[in-house]
Image: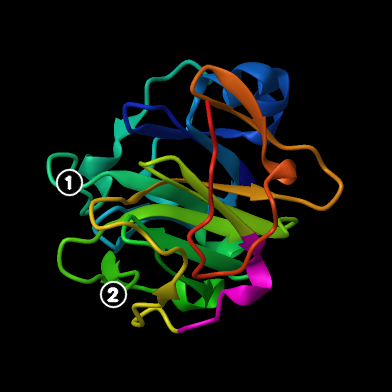
Amino acid sequence: MDVFFMMDKFGYARCVDMATYERNKEAALSENKYAFVCKNTGKICVFTNKGQLHTIKVSDLPFGKFRDKGVPIDNVSNYNTAEEEIVCVASQSELNLYRIVFVTKDSMMKIVDGGEFDVSKRSVAATKLQDGDEIISVEVLKEQRNIVLRSAEGYFLRFPLEEIPEKKKAAIGVRGMKLGAKDKVTDVDYTQNAVEQTIEYKDKMLELNKIKLGKRDGKGVKVRA
């Protein structure tokens, strides 16, 4: 049956039945970092900055009242809070239906079929990383049309998702943005066609759709604060 998974910013996870979720919908979505529907017989996928995928059986998570604290995911998986950071949490059954975009701080990127993460092991390498690199974004592709890469030095590059090749999970990928010697990608956003998307950048609101559409492997444009 369907259950509702919730995980707060401290990594405590739990599930409730759908009726409980519907009664507490607003709080469930506002108080948790990750919140979505999954099957009680399914698995939760946890992607980390070290390029690892940790899986958790939904049946291993506490199932009960809405205000129950839950359990630290370190206790029910191989995830280690001291050594890695969570980048994305998703339902394994949902991932089977979509493709996923990986982006690293050194601007390597690729699209991977979500079915590649339907694994039985508790931990596997979700992607290949070059020395010193780490994952900063893992995104499930649904309505998104363009990707926006932002660098530490204030460059923004927006280009169509079609320019990112689909690769196997063991591949490193391709370069998304030309970076200066000391620059790195810090943020990744997505835009949809005809849907306004704004972010706060240096205390001002920035409309991502108004950033000139470029090509993958360009330098991007410097946005003045």
Report the residue at 16% width, 61% height from top. 132
- Asked if residue 28 is positioned above or below residue 35 in the image, the reply reads above
Label 2 neighbour load within 10 Å: few <14, some 14-19, many 20+ = some
Work out whether residue 100 or residue 7 is closer to the camera in this orientation and state it: 100
Q: In the picture, residue 21 is in which quadrant?
A: top right
Query: Would you say residue 164 sits in the magenta stretch?
Result: yes
State the residue in front, 53 or 119. Answer: 53
Is residue 4 visible from the viewing direction of this image?
no
Query: Which region is colored magenta?
Result: 159-167
Q: Secondary structure at mark 2?
A: loop
Q: Position of residue 82 (x, y in %)?
A: 12, 40
Q: Is residue 199 left or right of residue 13?
A: right
Residue at mark 2: 128
Q: Amino acid at mark 1?
A: Asn
Circle 1 residue: 80
Q: Nearer the viewer, residue 51 or 16?
A: 51
Residue drawn 71% across the image and 56% down it: 144
Name the side, left or right, on which 43 lies relative to 120: right
* Residue 157 picture quarter: bottom right
Amino acid under disc 2: Lys
In the figure, is residue 148 to the left or right of 12? Answer: right
Q: Residue at x 28, y 70 (%)?
A: 124
Question: In terms of depth relative to the viewer, which is nearer, 116 or 155?
Answer: 155
State the image coordinates of residue 111 (x, y, percent, origin top left): 53, 73
| Image height of 67 relative to 78, above or below | above
